[in-house]
Image (tube, grey):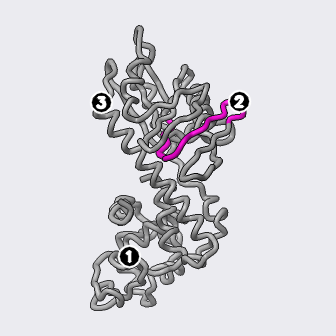
Amino acid sequence: MNERLLAQMVLVERVSKSHPAWNSISSELKSSLAGAGGEQRTLSLLKRELILPGETIILTDLSIPNGSGYAQLDLLVVNQKLVCVLEVKNMKGDFYFDSENLQFHRLVDGRTEGMKSPESQLHRAVKATERFLGIPVAGVIVLASRSGRVVEGPKNYPAVSLDYLPFYLESLVSGKKLFDEQKLSAKVRALPKRSFDQNLLERYGLRIDSLRLGVTCPRCRNSALCRKNRKWHCGGCDGFFHDAHEVTLQEYAVLFGAELPTSFAYRLLGVEDKHLLYRLLEKSALQGNERGRRWIVPRRELLEAYFGSIWR
């Protein structure tokens, strides 16, 4: 799971359904989950069926420098004879590409929906990758859902069904070795990982006080826990949990960064006793040189396990 997807999951649970932004947050999360599912199926298929000469390296969830900003890449295939950007779309409906105006719409369930053009997204990603690596780069729009059908196709890049993708990529390869796949992939991997767009909170009009604070019950998911008999207790399901606060700390870190003011940690975890707070934070949020500040130890796998059990 990438950082932005995790942030959207946190917001869906931490923002009240009565908040004006909740419907937008929920809708965007569903779209992000569909996209992530398509990318995962694409990656799995290529690892299983793609046969290219030499070693093939597939990189995912990349941000390539592009002018003053970044171009987002779903997948990048790097081989000694081919470097190709994959723009994965996991959507149903009839697709209409307008390559002249770089517009795109789909017809689904009798409705026409205008959307950001996959062709323009791919073009931006391909050109950014070419400039960054200094080599020619191919591009393919991948249709990951069998419920999607191209009625009017793109003119500048191919739109290929997921089932056919390995054979299509293999057809692009010919001639002698062109690239050093290890050096190219190392150059891309050396790029700093970008955190999710911090403007996400601003776009939704959210502040820390917009969120439900407290430690969430991993069973009920929306109930705040309290301390009882040295454990976290849920008054809703009567469950007891040892380390439920660990997920809460990681949620905070995804949204606001690792730096945690000790004064706010009381509100975040819903505790009042100083000694209890220090015990809870002892191994999970380390004390630095600056008094009154702690730094949350990153353990993203806790969030992936927690949300992975919910959004399957």
Mark 2 or mark 1: which comes first in sequence? 2
What range of the chain is rendered magenta?
Answer: 87-102
Q: Amino acid at mark 2?
A: Glu
Decide whether residue 108 is among the magenta residues.
no
Quarter of the image where one finds residue 56: top left
Q: Report x, y in % for residue 260.
A: 51, 71
Q: Report x, y in % for residue 57.
A: 37, 30
- Foreground mark, 3 or 1, reads 3
What residue occupies the far front of the structure in this picture? 110
Name the residue carrying label 1.
245
Q: Amino acid at mark 1?
A: His
Mark 3 or mark 1: which comes first in sequence? 3
Name the residue carrying label 3.
49
Identify which residue is drawn at 43% across, 79% down: 222
When the figure is inspected, residue 268 is found, relative to residue 153, above or below; the finding is: below
Name the residue carrying label 2.
100
Q: Report x, y in % for residue 284.
A: 38, 69
Q: How many marks?
A: 3
Q: Amino acid at mark 3?
A: Glu
Identify which residue is drawn at 34% across, 33% down: 46
User: Which SS class for mark 2?
Assistant: loop
Per the model, the C-alpha gap separating discs 3 and 2 is 35 Å
Identify which residue is drawn at 49% across, 79% down: 268
Q: Report x, y in % for residue 148.
A: 48, 42
Instruction: For label 3, count other residues whose C-alpha is less than 10 Å away and answer few (under 14), some (14-19) or many (20+).
Output: few
Quarter of the image where one finds residue 180: top left
- Foreground mark, 2 or 1, reads 2
